[in-house]
Image (cartoon, rainbow, N blue to C red):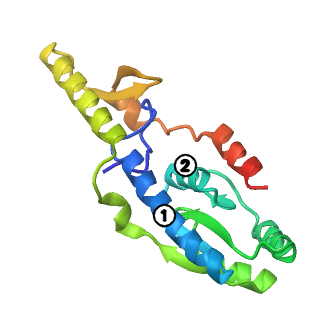
């Protein structure tokens, strides 16, 4: 499966939208609990090499901090911001961690060392792979499947099918395999601005 959205030459992979939806739902439930108990939480999500699930789910759920493998982070800065928020009366926060960054438990321990605040860790694990597909994933899968079959019938093989800006595209499989997907820094910067 490629739910991490780590395949280049397509905006989204099949299953990514469903995974993000499941993560956002879980974060909303965790936030309710953390808010009522005045606690902070680290939510560890899938994304060993690609932080898109963390980025999209964190942005959609209003996470205060999003840690992804594509962007270096500073634990001192994160701990200081938590302390500042705490002193201003905001006694809960959500930190989304893509698994490629490191274990949520280790990050929690490092934050605790720095500011005395111990975020509770929730590892969502394989729950992100299950569930009923979203309508976006169903439509994407149907469109890509139909496009792939039509390309094969026309004698065009050795291609990976994707959708870029609403257009179906076929890219040489060798090019796809040897290209790393670009991380969406604009969206990441938006998430940072909104969480301040």
- Residue 191 placement (x, y as % from top left): 68, 49
10 Å crowding of disc 2: few (<14), some (14-19), many (20+)? many
Residue extending farthest to the left is 153
Give the residue displayed 58% in from the left and 64% down from the top.
Answer: 97
In the visual, does 121 lie left or right of 127? right
> Mark 2 — residue?
56
On screen, 41 above or below 26? below
In the visual, does 121 lie left or right of 75? left
Corner quadrant of residue 74? bottom right
In the visual, does 114 lie left or right of 122? right
On screen, 168 above or below 188? above
Quarter of the picture holding the C terminus: bottom right
> Mark 1 — residue?
45
On screen, 131 above or below 12? below
Corner quadrant of residue 22? bottom left
N-term mark: 2 or 1: 1
Give the residue displayed 12% in from the left and 17% down from the top.
Answer: 153
10 Å crowding of disc 1: few (<14), some (14-19), many (20+)? many
Residue extending farthest to the top is 154
């Amino acid at each position: 499966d490629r739910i991490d959205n780590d395949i280049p030459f397509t905006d989204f992979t099949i299953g990514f939208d469903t995974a993000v939806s499941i993560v956002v739902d879980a974060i909303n439930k965790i936030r309710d609990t953390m808010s009522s108990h005045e606690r902070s939480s680290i939510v560890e999500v899938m994304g060993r090499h690609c932080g898109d699930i963390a980025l999209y789910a964190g942005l959609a759920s209003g996470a205060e901090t999003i840690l992804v493998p594509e962007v270096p982070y500073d634990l001192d800065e994160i701990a200081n911001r938590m302390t500042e928020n705490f002193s201003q009366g905001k006694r809960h926060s959500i930190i989304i961690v893509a698994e490629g960054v490191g274990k949520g438990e280790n990050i929690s321990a490092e934050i605790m060392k720095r500011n005395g605040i111990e975020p509770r860790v929730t590892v969502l694990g394989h729950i992100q792979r299950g569930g009923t597909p979203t309508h976006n994933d169903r439509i994407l899968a149907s469109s890509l499947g139909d496009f792939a079959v039509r390309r094969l019938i026309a004698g065009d093989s050795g291609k990976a099918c994707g959708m870029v800006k609403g257009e179906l595209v076929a890219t040489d499989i060798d090019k796809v395999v040897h290209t790393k997907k670009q991380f969406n820094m604009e969206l990441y910067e938006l998430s940072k601005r909104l969480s301040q």
